[in-house]
Every structure is written in structure tokens, then in C-alpha cells.
Amino acid sequence: MKKLVSLVSVVAFVAAPAFAQSSVKASHTNRVIESYRAYIGEADLFNSNGVRLTQPWQIIRQDRANFHQFGVRDRDDQSDSFFADPANRQALEAMLRNGTMTRDAANMIVRGNVWIDVDIYGSQGSGRWIDVTVSD
């Protein structure tokens, strides 16, 4: 009888995490929480100290800092509320690492003078990743 109880306990223990995990996924759906379009101009290619930026995430982050913090905006840049928060701008590198951007898009951003479309994905106001595309 003891062996039967032990086996039942093990089966219940192993099955419980799988059930809990699936219910957690069902309650947290990631979706687009905000989108914006911005022009990556000359000012976005340099940081506040005048150093040329070499990574696309740095340039996108500088574009949002220029827009929200420094008031340096390219004509027709769109606003966003998500990257108005400096903590969210700081998370941009990790969010891009978790998102998508083609190698060609990354190279075009580093060269500058391109339009980007950014989709911010998350849940309950918290950003998880961004997808970045270059467009005409």
C-alpha cells in the first residue's frame, strides 16, 4: 500500500507543474501595445557626447531620447508613450534582442537616413520585445 501512495504522489507532483504552466501562459497574452514611425536622421547617429553610434539598438534608443528628452525631432517623427519613460529606453537593447529585425534593416539603420517602423509588444503595459522594419 505504501508503494501505491508514493506512486500517486509522484504522478500528482509531476502533473501539477504542467497544468500550472499552461494556465499561466493563457493569462498573459503578448500583443502590440504601441507602434510608431520615425526617421533616423543625422542627429540620431551620435550620442550626447558626439560619439558615433555603431549598433542599431543604440541609434533607435538615441532617436527616442532625442524625441522625448532633448526635443530633437525629424520632420514627421511620430510620438510614442512607451519610450517617453527613460527606463523603457534603457530596456530597448534587450527588447530588440528578444524581437526581430533583419540584418539588412540593421545595416540601413546604422547608415542612417531611413524610416523605421517599430512595434512594441507586451502585456499589461510592460514591454517584452520590439520588431523593427525599415520602410520607404
Image (tube, rainbow, N blue to C red):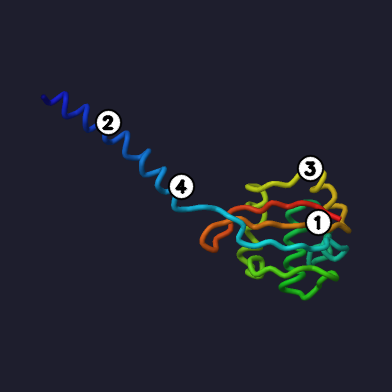
Quarter of the figure that contains the C terminus = bottom right
Counting from the top left corner in percent of width and height, residue 72 is at 81, 73
Picture disc at residue 53: 1
Counting from the top left corner in percent of width and height, residue 131 is at 69, 51
Q: Earlier in the sequence, mark 1 or mark 4?
A: 4
Q: Nearest to the eye among marks 1 and 4: give it.
A: 4
Dot 2 amino acid type? Val
Pointer 3 local density, CA inside 10 Å: few below 14, some 14–19, many at least 20: few
Q: Nearest to the eye among marks 1 and 3: give it.
A: 3
Tally of numbered tags: 4
Image-based side of 45 in relation to 4, left or right? right
Pointer 4 residue: 25
How far apart are the alpha carbons under marks 1 and 2? 55 Å
Counting from the top left corner in percent of width and height, residue 102 is at 76, 44
Give the residue displayed 62% in from the left and 52% down from the top.
129
How far apart are the alpha carbons under marks 2 and 4? 22 Å
Picture disc at residue 24: none
Dot 3 amino acid type? Arg
Q: Earlier in the sequence, mark 1 or mark 2?
A: 2
Give the residue displayed 68% in from the left and 56% down from the top.
119
Among the 4 quarters of the image, the one containing residue 33: bottom right
Dot 4 amino acid type? Lys
Q: Earlier in the sequence, mark 3 or mark 4?
A: 4
Pointer 3 residue: 103
Disc 3 secondary structure class: helix
Pointer 2 local density, CA inside 10 Å: few below 14, some 14–19, many at least 20: few
Pointer 2 residue: 11
Disc 4 secondary structure class: helix
> Which residue extends farthest bottom?
71
Quarter of the figure that contains the N terminus = top left
Instruction: Classify 133 as above or below 7.
Output: below
